[in-house]
Amino acid sequence: MPALAIRNLEFSAIRITLPTVPVFYECQRCTACCRWPGIVRVTDEEITRLSALKEISEREFIQRYTRLAEDRRGLVLTDNTRGECVFLEGEDCAVQSEKPRQCREFPNLWNFPGFEKICKAIPRDVSDEAYRRLTGADSSPISVVDGILPEARVPDNVAQESHFKPIIKPFAAS
Ligand code: SF4
Ligand code: SF4
């Protein structure tokens, strides 16, 4: 186990990798994520596929269905008059087969704290293989915990030194 020497104090740096049972959130097509305020970013490749699906030129697609993101870092889909995604038609996505990656990966590969309160996707324990197949992820989720074993208590004056804070704060606080 590697040891860190901070002045005269000895700590053991550890990394624990915990296996996690993969959870796959099965979308229930409630369309809440197509309705809530927000943006859907689209890449050049997605615009190519979406314009082909709509059987219009990329130029026309960009003019009709996209706008510049507020941060000016690429294009996002426009909204309809109710503030929903422009491709929401009733209870369906009009571009389901070519929907942008951002839509395909929610909520399994990205989400936000509290998303379960709005999203109706049902969490199911699945095998590693099933998780990768269903999400397209390269690997199953793991939990990685970095820490330092408190072989010695950290004096307050050491804990206050800003360049040590990130690694010794958990033990200095107690
Ligand atoms: S592209 Fe389709 S899935 Fe994505 S937000 Fe719009 S309607 Fe919903
Ligand atoms: S909010 Fe969740 S359950 Fe509803 S359509 Fe989006 S991903 Fe599926």
Image (tube, rainbow, N blue to C red):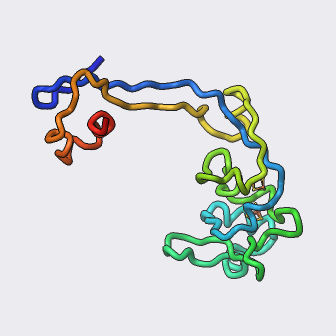
Most foreground residue, 143 or 76: 143
Give the residue drawn at x 17%, y 45%.
161
**Position of residue 1 measured from the top left corner of the image (x, y, whole percent):** 30, 17
Give the residue drawn at x 74%, y 59%.
99
Query: Residue farthest to the front?
Result: 174
**Position of residue 29 measured from the top left corner of the image (x, y, whole percent):** 83, 54
Quarter occupied by residue 41: bottom right
Quarter occupied by residue 91: bottom right
Query: Residue farthest to the left?
Result: 8
Most foreground residue, 139 or 110: 110
**Position of residue 64 measured from the top left corner of the image (x, y, whole percent):** 72, 80
Give the residue drawn at x 50%, y 75%.
72
Q: Viewed as shown, does residue 82 lie left or right of 165?
A: right
Give the residue drawn at x 69%, y 41%.
135
Q: Viewed as shown, does residue 11 lie left or right of 22?
A: left
**Position of residue 82 measured from the top left corner of the image (x, y, whole percent):** 77, 79
Vertical position of residue 6 compared to residue 12: above or below = below
Q: How many marks?
A: 0
Query: Residue farthest to the top?
Result: 1
For ligand 1, the image quadrant comes to bottom right
Most foreground residue, 53 or 1: 1
Quarter placement of the C terminus: top left
Vertical position of residue 64 compared to residue 173: above or below = below
Quarter occupied by residue 155: top left
